[in-house]
């Protein structure tokens, strides 16, 4: 699975203008089952996305289709990891990742 860290590279006013398109794009990725969790970052990233395990090339293509990236308003850093322990409350996510 991956953690995708989104960092804005443009002023907030430009980012805010593109936010509806970015939100629609996020919704589509959740509907497709690629994204599992997303939210506002506190610190190193402006937004954090936890994704299902997919081929890295596929993930890179998905992230490149983000309206923020297309408009050069943000960039992603991707961290790949394998979950080896999961809290009881998140077992359903862990089981989904195994499939």
Image: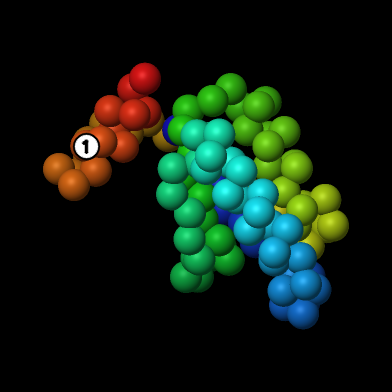
Q: Secondary structure at mark 1?
A: helix
Residue 78 visible, this orientation: no
Question: Does 72 appear above or below 43?
Answer: above
Left or right of 38 in this view: 24: right
In the picture as drawn, the residue positioned furthest to the right comes out as: 71
Q: Position of residue 51 (x, y in %)?
A: 49, 39
Question: Does 52 appear above or below 50?
Answer: above
Viewport quadrant of the C terminus: top left
Q: Residue at x 67, y 26 (%)?
A: 57
Left or right of 27 in this view: 96: left
* Residue receiving disc 1: 91
In the picture as drawn, the residue positioned furthest to the bottom comes out as: 13
Left or right of 56 in this view: 20: right
Q: Residue at x 54, y 25 (%)?
A: 54
Left or right of 22 in this view: 86: left
Give the tally of numbered discs. Answer: 1
Way the structure is coloured: rainbow
Compare residues 84 and 28 and report the one nearer the observer.
Answer: 28
Residue 62 visible, this orientation: yes
Compare residues 11 and 77 and report the one nearer the observer.
Answer: 11
Viewport quadrant of the N terminus: top left
Q: Position of residue 61 (x, y in %)?
A: 72, 33
Binning the other alpha carbons within 10 Å of mark 1 as few (below 14), some (14 to 19) or many (20 upward) gives few
Q: Residue at x 50, y 70 (%)?
A: 43
Compare residues 65 and 42 and report the one nearer the observer.
Answer: 65
Q: Position of residue 94 (x, y in %)?
A: 29, 33
Q: Residue at x 31, y 37 (%)?
A: 93
In the picture as drawn, the residue positioned furthest to the left comes out as: 88
Question: Does 6 appear above or below 89?
Answer: below
Q: Position of residue 56 (x, y in %)?
A: 61, 27
């Amino acid at each position: 699975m991956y953690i995708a860290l989104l960092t804005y590279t443009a002023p907030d006013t430009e980012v805010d203008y593109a936010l509806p398109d970015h939100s629609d794009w996020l919704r589509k990725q959740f509907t497709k089952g690629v994204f599992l969790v997303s939210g506002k970052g506190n610190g190193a990233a402006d937004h954090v996305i936890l994704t299902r395990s997919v081929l890295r090339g596929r993930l890179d293509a998905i992230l490149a289709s983000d309206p923020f990236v297309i408009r050069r308003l943000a960039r992603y850093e991707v961290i790949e990891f394998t979950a080896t322990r999961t809290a009881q409350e998140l077992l359903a996510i862990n089981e989904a990742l195994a499939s």
